[in-house]
Image (spheres, helix red, strand yellow):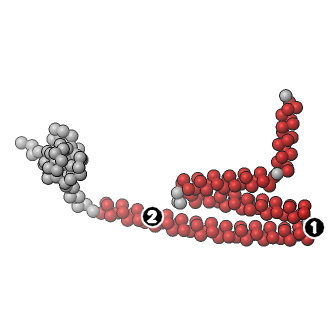
Amino acid sequence: MKGFFSRIGKAIGRFLLRHWAGTLIVIFSLLALFTAYQMWRLGPVLALSLLPQLVICLVLLVGVIAVRQVVKGVTKGGALQTQVAKGVAQDTLSRGQAVVEREVEQAKSSLSALAQDVKADLGRVIGEQTATSTPVPPVAPRCPSCGRFVRAGAKFCDGCGAALLATCPHCGRALRPGAKFCDGCGKPIRPVA
């Protein structure tokens, strides 16, 4: 049994040595896809934390592809092709890295500006809600069956005849049957004698 696992391990090792570039391309592609999926699930603000991981996967993927091309050039041609391929690969990697770094910085600044705008808008909305101390006028009641507006105090809808729930005359909140006080605003439903 020990020899069986030893042969399998050697076979896997030979396969990985023979197809190292393809294996790395598949691994980095899957990592990049998984990271992009996580970024999509988290949304734009939280995805910023995964952006460096995605950039690293993509740079490594491009690097493996470039090195594979260099190795293919070495096996097919002479030293001149190898030097040209190395130069092209290094130039491509350096340009790609510069572009990725520039795009990451732009994305960070855009997301930072978006976060500041959202924070300012939220502060303004919360400030407006606390600043307005005027009571909200009660909403005209609607029939739960047909949605038609009904008169305050009506027990049945004049459009469909459905029984209406009682609502608070002060805040418009639905009341339990037989309630004497509103559980939303605390005011009495009927004047207490």
The reply to whether discs 1 and 2 touch (Cβ–Cβ < 8 Å) is no
Sequence-first tag of 1 and 2: 1
Q: Which amino acid is tagged 2?
A: Val
- Name the element at disc 1: loop
x 9%, y 43%: residue = 192
Q: Which amino acid is tagged 1?
A: Gly
Could you tell me if residue 129 is visible in this image?
Answer: yes
Residue 50 on image: x %, y %: 61, 57
Examine the rendered structure and indicate whether residue 116 appears above or below residue 141.
below
Crowdedness of circle 1 by 10 Å Cα count: few (<14), some, many (20+)? Answer: few
Residue 97 horizontal side relative to residue 185, left or right: right
Residue 135 on image: x %, y %: 22, 58
Hey, which quadrant is residue 190 in on the image? top left
Name the quarter where the N terminus is drawn.
top right
x 59%, y 54%: residue = 37
Hey, which quadrant is residue 55 in on the image? bottom right
In the picture, the disc for residue 78 is 1
Residue 116 horizontal side relative to residue 65, left or right: left
What residue is pinned by disc 2? 118
Crowdedness of circle 2 by 10 Å Cα count: few (<14), some, many (20+)? Answer: few
Nearest to the eye among marks 1 and 2: give it. 1
Name the quarter where the C terminus is drawn.
top left
Disc 1 from disc 2: Cα separation: 59 Å
Residue 7 horizontal side relative to residue 54, left or right: right
Is 115 in front, or is 103? 103
- Name the element at disc 2: helix
Residue 171 on image: x %, y %: 21, 52
x 87%, y 36%: residue = 7
Could you tell me if residue 169 is visible in this image?
Answer: no
x 21%, y 53%: residue = 148
**What residue occupies the far top of the structure in this picture?**
1
**What residue occupies the far left of the structure in this picture?**
193
